[in-house]
Image (cartoon, helix red, strand yellow):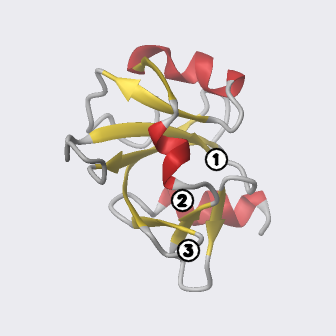
């Protein structure tokens, strides 16, 4: 999938379910964040409560075709495993845009994330 289609579908995906490639439920998209200079999505925020403590957690996932796939029905698939979320490095939410590109794969858990910022920074 080209990055333009990925970008277009993700712009309309807030509230959509996210699954692994094996169709395991991961959570839902809470927000999409665009870069400051253009309309391309920099990363998506995944809201998830699938872990043993059932605590709601937020993860920033870099918007790349290597990590996110859109199926024919516009369903979002994360090309990573649940363990990748469990082992994701935790960063302060306010530092996310500066830090996310430093991690490979580019998934990090956000500490002190407040939802409802909208579709841009």
Mark 2 lies on a secondary structure that is: helix
Circle 1 Cα neighbour tier, 10 Å, few/some/many (<14 / 14–19 / ≥20):
many
Q: Which residue is mark 1?
A: 63
Report the mark closest to the observer, 1 or 3.
Answer: 3
For residue 52, the mark is none
Q: In which image quadrant can residue 105 be found?
A: top right
Q: Which residue is mark 2?
A: 10
Q: In which image quadrant can residue 73 be found?
A: bottom right
Depth check, front residue: 1 or 50: 50
Residue 53 on image: x %, y %: 20, 42
Depth check, front residue: 79 or 99: 79
For residue 22, the mark is 3
N-term mark: 1 or 2: 2
Mark 1 lies on a secondary structure that is: loop
Query: For the point 48% across and 43% down, which residue is it?
Result: 85
| Residue found at the very far bottom of the displayed protein | 72
20 is higher (above) or lower (below) than 65? below
Circle 3 Cα neighbour tier, 10 Å, few/some/many (<14 / 14–19 / ≥20):
few
- The reply to whether residue 53 is in sight is yes
N-term mark: 1 or 3: 3
Query: For the point 71% across and 33% down, which residue is it?
Result: 104
Q: CA distance from mark 3 to mark 2?
A: 20 Å
20 is higher (above) or lower (below) than 75? above
Residue 49 on image: x %, y %: 26, 50
- Pointers 3 and 2 in contact (C-beta within 8 Å): no
Report the mark closest to the observer, 1 or 2.
Answer: 1
Mark 3 lies on a secondary structure that is: loop
| Residue found at the very far left of the displayed protein | 54
Q: CA distance from mark 1 to mark 2?
A: 9 Å
Q: In which image quadrant can residue 27 be found?
A: bottom left
Q: CA distance from mark 1 to mark 3?
A: 20 Å
22 is higher (above) or lower (below) than 47? below
């Amino acid at each position: 999938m080209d990055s333009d289609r990925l970008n277009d579908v993700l712009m309309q995906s807030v509230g959509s379910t996210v699954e692994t490639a094996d169709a395991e439920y991961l959570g839902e998209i809470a927000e999409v964040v665009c870069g400051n200079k253009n309309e391309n999505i920099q990363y998506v925020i995944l809201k998830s409560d699938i872990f043993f403590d059932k605590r709601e957690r937020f993860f920033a996932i870099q918007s790349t075709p290597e990590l996110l796939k859109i199926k024919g029905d516009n369903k979002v698939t994360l090309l990573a495993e649940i363990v990748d979320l469990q082992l994701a490095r935790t960063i302060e939410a306010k530092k996310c845009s500066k830090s996310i590109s430093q991690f490979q794969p580019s998934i990090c858990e956000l500490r002190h994330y407040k939802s409802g910022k909208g579709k841009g920074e």
